[in-house]
Image (cartoon, rainbow, N blue to C red):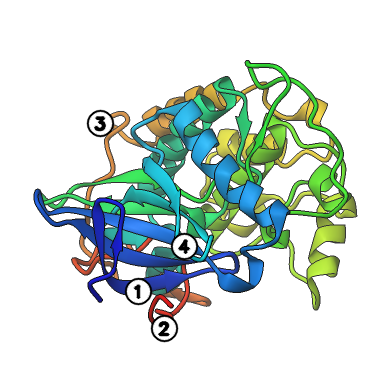
Amino acid sequence: MGLRLGDYEILEAIGQGGMGIVYRGVQPIIKKRVAIKVMRPEVANDEVQVQRLIDEAEAVNAIGHRNIIDIFGMGRLPDGRPYIVMEFLEGQPLDQVLNLMGRPELPDALALLIDIAGPLAAAHKAGVVHRDLKPSNVFLCAQPDGSRFVKLLDFGLAKRARVVQGDGQQTSETTVAGTPDYMAPEQARGLGTTPSTDLYALGVMAYEMVTGALPFRGETPMDVMMAHVHSPVPSARAKVPELPAELDALISALMAKSEARRPPSADAVRDALISIADAVSADGFRPLEPRPRVSSPRPSGPRPGTPPVPAPPVAPPDGEPPGPLA
């Protein structure tokens, strides 16, 4: 496309979300690839949405963790629309992997959850609550040697806690923010959010990864939200009997209706997951590695091992490529 934004040249549109459009860019001299998120024209004058973009950049830089997408800079287009410059990632978001390949083998699911809990703990220690943790915001980055690692994305809904250690109550929200399938009861009710809210979402992801299904379904998003508030937490082991009892108990604790009954921190969850992984694998905890696909069928799709990450680059946001930058 040839348009310049600061030091970067815009090459093509690669993704879009409700708030912004993402372009692939490059620093022409050193050829560094970047992703540039530009706010949509229709929301560029919405002060709340603009502040959300600024908050995302501030939250990410406050954490400073290698497993959280890095943001290099921020600016405005000549028409006033703000943009942020992020690292360009190659790989796939976790939701695409799960949709394509089905549920992973248990050791690989545990490895993924451990890798997610690490940066989540760092965010909470920096006083940042993600508030929209879900598979589409977990990116599996491909490495040249075939290995991969996790990056947490999209801190656009993140809130800074009053207490640096992340144990302070958030102020109440006037609107419900988040994704119904992974929404904690307090979040669904529009109440304050804390690090425990993210732990609930991690519990939903854990249930989904080890069973191949979400814990709650409904005809409308409101039905799902009310199920998170009122319905009993389903047992993952009742659906998959071979799961360790300790994992079933951990998932139930993460999804407790009361925040006080959930684990005390993401670090504590990570430690528990590592202990379970040690017991599951005779080799102890092992890093996430590509494994051959297993073709045995299951009701909602094939049951694979950990799927390899395809080579084509995928931008952090999901959605079809939009039109050109105007």
Mark 2 nearby-residue class (10 Å; few <14, some 14–19, many ≥20) = few
For the residue marked with disc 4, what is the amino acid?
Val
Q: Nearer the viewer, mark 4 or mark 1?
A: 4
Q: Are marks 1 and 2 in contact (CB under 8 Å)?
A: yes
Residue at 44%, 49% in the rendered image? 75
Q: Where is mark 4, residue-wise?
A: 38
Mark 1 neighbour class, 10 Å CA radius: few under 14, some 14 to 19, many 20 or more: many
Distance of mark 3 from mark 2, alpha carbons?
49 Å
- Mark 3 near mark 2, Cβ–Cβ under 8 Å? no
Q: Quadrant of residue 4?
A: bottom left
Badge nearest the viewer, 4 or 3: 4
How much space separates mark 3 and mark 1, taking CA atoms? 44 Å
Specify the amino acid type for callout 1. Answer: Ala
> Where's residue 265, x and y in %?
62, 23
The amino acid sitting under disc 3 is: Asp
Q: Which element is circle 3 on?
A: loop
State the mark number for residue 178: none
Q: Earlier in the sequence, mark 4 or mark 1?
A: 1
Helix, strand, or loop for circle 1?
A: strand
| Count of numbered badges drawn on the protein | 4
Identify the residue under disc 1: 13
Disc nearer the start of the sequence (3/2):
3
Circles 3 and 1 in contact, beta carbons < 8 Å:
no
CA distance for labels 1 and 2: 7 Å
Which residue is labeled 3 in the image? Answer: 283
- The residue tagged 2 is 323
Circle 4 SS class: strand
Q: Is residue 303 visible?
A: no
Which residue appears at 69% of the width and 61% of the height? Answer: 181
